[in-house]
Image (cartoon, rainbow, N blue to C red):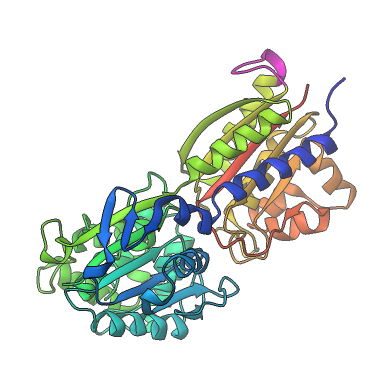
């Protein structure tokens, strides 16, 4: 008997929840950081705390509050103080560290003030001090200290243009790093000569450390010239604020110092540890699917591209499994991870995961026994309160019964309103973690 769509939907949510549990930020830190007497073991590095005068804790991102809680539980009063900048609703009460809420994905003044507090604190760090820097997804928008001559409004306008043009997070962060006093290795400069250890939870394809949170404590491989080229390629060079354009042009001409590169003194006493990634979430999802009786296949944790186009290809795999049993026979669970993009063409409301499922549902229209789920591990998809959505081959028929035209909703990028009316949004609330998005295809027996 073929599995019902309702059963597949239930299983999809159980599998997604398992993925979230595997990338809990507190547990991620506890796996990599241990304390034995005065010896602090951070992955393969051992730090003698008896030789450390002060431990400072700083960071930015959606997941850094629970990461900091794990360190407070471990180090207690050894922590002299600290400042974190987190997205609204992603904070926790901490004993030794100040938590500052700020806006994401478009930065606000609270993010500026929190970042300036971090820079001021690091200016007090000395050679015998230890700075632990926590970075997770969302850090790029939250760690906001515009370069001289650039206002917050300039950064906000530039961010909005970048988010709407279809650029990847690697490309967006290249530009962010060249408009900031904190990103692109500049936080390491602020902490020098203290020892600086960064604990990083990855939310970018490829886990590139200089891209996660725009790499505040690692050497920057990108340049001002790269930033200008990207803005021209996406045809928004003439639409960004004059002050931003002037700053980048000055940098490209060599009249403004570049971001710190490999070999700079700031990195002599810096180290980085990747404590969590999308691949770990996918592995946990695969394990849970196996426990539920599915044959599983993890295709990739590095998926990029236009959401609606990737969704069509993903849906085609489901149809192939149904017709030929390839690349694996049903019951099957196929998983991918990464971060797609949406090039805005309409005036609707949604996010890349909701748009992915809407496009996938259109591709599966009329097919039984195939379910798609796409959701952000941070609990947020675009400027909405949903993490993503779930759909299947009956989604479009259900919409038409309510006089909703799926094609029209996709055309105007209005996937949130579409799925809200169907009751098919995935709503988790803030998860306080962030390792990109999980895309799931379930094909019943």
56 or 272: which is nearer to us? 56
Q: Judge left or right: residue 61 versus residue 119.
A: right
Residue at the front extreme?
37
Q: Judge left or right: residue 141 versus residue 380.
A: left
Q: Position of residue 131 (x, y in %)?
A: 29, 70
Q: Position of residue 387 (x, y in %)?
A: 64, 56
The count of marks equals: 0
Q: In which quarter of the view is residue 292 placed?
A: top right
432 or 127: which is nearer to us? 127
Q: Judge left or right: residue 138 versus residue 228.
A: right
Q: Judge left or right: residue 148 versus residue 84.
A: left
State the quadrant of the N terminus. Answer: top right
Regarding residue 336, the answer to whether it shows in the image is yes
Q: Which residues are magenta?
A: 322-330
Residue 358, placed above or below residue 121: above
Residue 373, placed above or below residue 109: above
Residue 21, placed above or below residue 330: below
242 or 4: which is nearer to us? 4
Q: Position of residue 167 (x, y in %)?
A: 41, 55
Regarding residue 229, the answer to whether it shows in the image is no
Specify the principal SS of the magenta part: loop
Residue 168 is inside the magenta segment: no
| Residue at the image position 84 percent from the left and 23 percent from the top | 2
Q: In which quarter of the view is residue 177 placed?
A: bottom left
State the quadrant of the C terminus. Answer: top right
Residue at the right extreme?
401
| Residue at the image position 41 percent from the left and 79 percent from the top | 83
Q: Position of residue 44 (x, y in %)?
A: 29, 47
């Amino acid at each position: 008997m073929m599995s019902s769509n309702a059963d597949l939907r239930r299983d999809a949510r159980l599998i997604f929840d398992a993925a979230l549990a595997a990338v809990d930020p507190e547990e991620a830190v506890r796996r990599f950081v241990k304390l034995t007497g005065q010896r602090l073991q951070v992955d393969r590095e051992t730090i003698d705390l008896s030789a450390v005068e002060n431990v400072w804790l700083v960071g930015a991102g959606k997941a850094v509050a629970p990461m900091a809680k794990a360190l407070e539980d471990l180090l207690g009063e050894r922590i002299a103080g600290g400042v974190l900048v987190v997205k609204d609703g992603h904070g926790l009460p901490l004993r030794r560290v100040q938590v500052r809420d700020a806006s994401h994905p478009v930065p606000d003044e609270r993010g500026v003030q929190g970042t300036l507090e971090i820079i001021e604190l690091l200016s007090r760090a000395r050679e015998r001090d230890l700075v632990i820097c926590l970075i997770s997804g969302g850090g790029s928008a939250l760690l906001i200290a515009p370069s001289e001559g650039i206002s917050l409004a300039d950064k906000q306008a530039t961010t909005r243009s970048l988010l709407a043009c279809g650029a990847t997070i690697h490309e967006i962060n290249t530009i962010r790093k060249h408009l900031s006093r904190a990103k692109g290795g500049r936080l390491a400069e602020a902490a020098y000569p203290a020892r600086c250890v960064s604990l990083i939870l990855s939310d970018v394809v490829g886990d590139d450390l200089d891209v996660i949170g725009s790499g505040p404590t690692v050497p920057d491989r990108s340049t001002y010239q790269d930033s200008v080229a990207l803005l021209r390629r996406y045809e928004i060079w003439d639409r960004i604020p004059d002050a931003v354009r002037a700053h980048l042009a000055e940098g490209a001409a060599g009249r403004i110092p570049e971001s710190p590169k490999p070999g700079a003194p700031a990195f002599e006493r810096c180290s980085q540890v990747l404590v969590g990634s999308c691949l770990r979430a996918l592995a946990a999802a695969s394990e849970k699917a196996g426990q539920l009786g599915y044959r599983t296949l993890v295709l990739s944790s590095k998926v990029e591209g236009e959401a609606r186009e990737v969704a069509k290809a993903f849906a085609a795999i489901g149809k192939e499994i149904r017709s030929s049993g390839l690349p694996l026979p049903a019951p099957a669970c196929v998983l991918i991870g990464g971060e797609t993009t949406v090039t805005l063409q309409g005036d609707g409301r949604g996010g890349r995961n909701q748009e992915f499922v809407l496009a996938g549902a259109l591709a599966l229209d009329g097919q039984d026994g195939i379910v798609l789920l796409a959701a952000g591990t941070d609990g947020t998809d675009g400027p909405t309160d949903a993490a993503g959505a779930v759909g299947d081959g009956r989604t479009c028929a259900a919409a038409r019964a309510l006089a909703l035209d799926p094609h029209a909703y996709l055309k105007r990028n209005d996937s949130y309103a579409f799925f809200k009316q169907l009751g098919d949004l995935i709503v988790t609330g803030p998860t306080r973690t962030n390792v990109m998005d999980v895309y799931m295809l379930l094909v019943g027996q």
